[in-house]
Image (cartoon, rainbow, N blue to C red):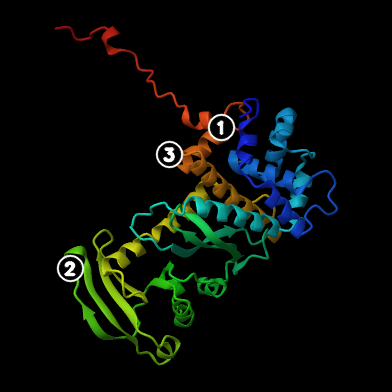
Amino acid sequence: MNYGRIIFAQLMDFLPIYDFRRCVERYDGNKHTKGFSCWDQYLCMAFAQLTYRESLRDIEACLRAIPTRRYHMGIRGSVARSTLGEANEKRDWRIYADFAQVLISQARSLYSKDDFGLELEKTVYALDSTTIDLCLSLFPWAHFRKTKAAVKLHTLLDLRGSIPALSFITDGKVHDVNILDYLLPEAGSFYIMDRGYLDYTRLYKIHLSQAFFIIRAKSNTQFRRVYSHEVDRACGLICDQSGVLIGFYTAQEYPDKIRRIKFYDTETRKRLVFLTNNFILPALTIAQLYKCRWKIELFFKWIKQHLRIKAFYGTTENAVKTQIWIAISIYVLVAIMKKRLHLDLELYTILQILSVTLFEKAPLLQTLTSFDYTSDQVDPSNQLNLFPD
C-alpha cells in the first residue's frame, strides 16, 4: 500500500469505479457538465457524510481550505456551493440509487454466511419504513399532512449483516402496505413485517411465490382453528394453531391454510399474535424470528443519528433522494470495508475514527486497529498519604 495516500482515498478504493461510470452513462449524468463530474459530486457528498458537514457552505469552506488534500481525494473539479447545489438538484438521483444497489450486492455476498442470532440457513428479511420530517414551506412536493411535509424511507433489510437489500423513497402519504407491490419474493426466504403490512391479497402472492411471511395479526382477525399443536408454555408460548381465515373478504383473498401463534413477551408484558404460512419451523423459532425484526428499527435509528439524512443540502425532490442514496451507499461502503479488512469494530466506531483521520497519510488498516489504551493515571504509590497511621 502507498503510505503517502490519505485515508479518504484509501477508503474510496473499495468503490467499484467501473460500475459507477456505467451508472453515470446509463442516465447521461456527465452531459453538459463543466469541470465538475458526477464522480466529483459523489466524493464531495461522501466527504460531507463522513465528516458530518451541516450545509453546502460548510462543505465548500472545508474543501477549499485544503486544495492539495482535495486533489489527493480525487476531486478534480472546482468546489463551489452553487455548483454542488446545482448538481444535486439536476443530476438524476437514479445514478446514485443504482450505484448503491451495486454496493449492496457486494455487501450481501460478503455477509451471506454471518449469523444473525438464529441457526437458520434461509435468507431472512425485515420490512419496515421510517418517516423523515421536513418543512412544508421548503419541501412542498413531499405531501404528508396539512401543516407538515415528510418523506418515507421504505427498506427491506437483510438480517445477515443488517444490509438494506431494497430501499424506496416516497412522500409521507404513501402507505407502507403499497411497497409489497414492488417486492419480488425469493422462494424459501422469510419476510418479517409489522401489522401495518397486513393485506391478505398481497400476503397470498408471497405464499404463491413459495416464500414465507411472519406478520403480526390485528385484533379483529377472524380465524377458525382446525388443529392445535402442543406448546411449551414455560417458553412464553400460549398456542400454536393451524386454521383458515373466515372473514367474507379475507377468506377469498387468502383461501389456503394459515398458522396462528400466540406468544407472551415477558419483557414488554404483551401478548403477541403472529400469522405465518410456514408450518415446519417450531413455534418458538417463529416468535424469535419476529423478535429479530427489531434490527431494522435499530438500523433506522443508526442512520438517522450517524448519517446526514435529517438535514438536507437541497430542497428539491432530486436533491433529497440524491443525498439519501449517497448516505446509504456510504453506510454499505463502510460495511464492505469492515468485512474485507476483518475488523471487529462497530460501524459507529469506524465512522468516528474516519471523521477525524480522513486527511491523515497512514495505512487505513493501521489507523483502524492501532489503539493506545495505556492509562494516564499516576501511580498512587507516589502520592503522599494524607492520613498517616
Residue beneath label 3, please? 344
Question: Which of the numbered marks, if any, corresponds to residue 233?
Answer: 2
Which amino acid type corresponds to the residue marked 2 in the rendered image? Arg
- Tell me if 254 is positioned left or right of 65 in this view: left
Residue at point 41% right, 51% down? Answer: 114
Question: Which quadrant holds residue 379?
Answer: top left
Measure the alpha-carbon separation of dots 2 and 3. 38 Å
Measure the alpha-carbon separation of dots 1 and 3. 14 Å
Residue at point 26% right, 85% down? Answer: 225
Which amino acid type corresponds to the residue marked 1 in the rendered image? Leu
Q: Residues within 10 Å of mark 2 (few under 14, many from 20)?
A: few
Residue at point 41% right, 56% down? Answer: 295
Under circle 3, the secondary element is loop
Whether tag 2 and tag 3 are in contact, CB under 8 A, the answer is no
Which amino acid type corresponds to the residue marked 3 in the rendered image? Asp
Q: Earlier in the sequence, mark 2 or mark 3?
A: 2
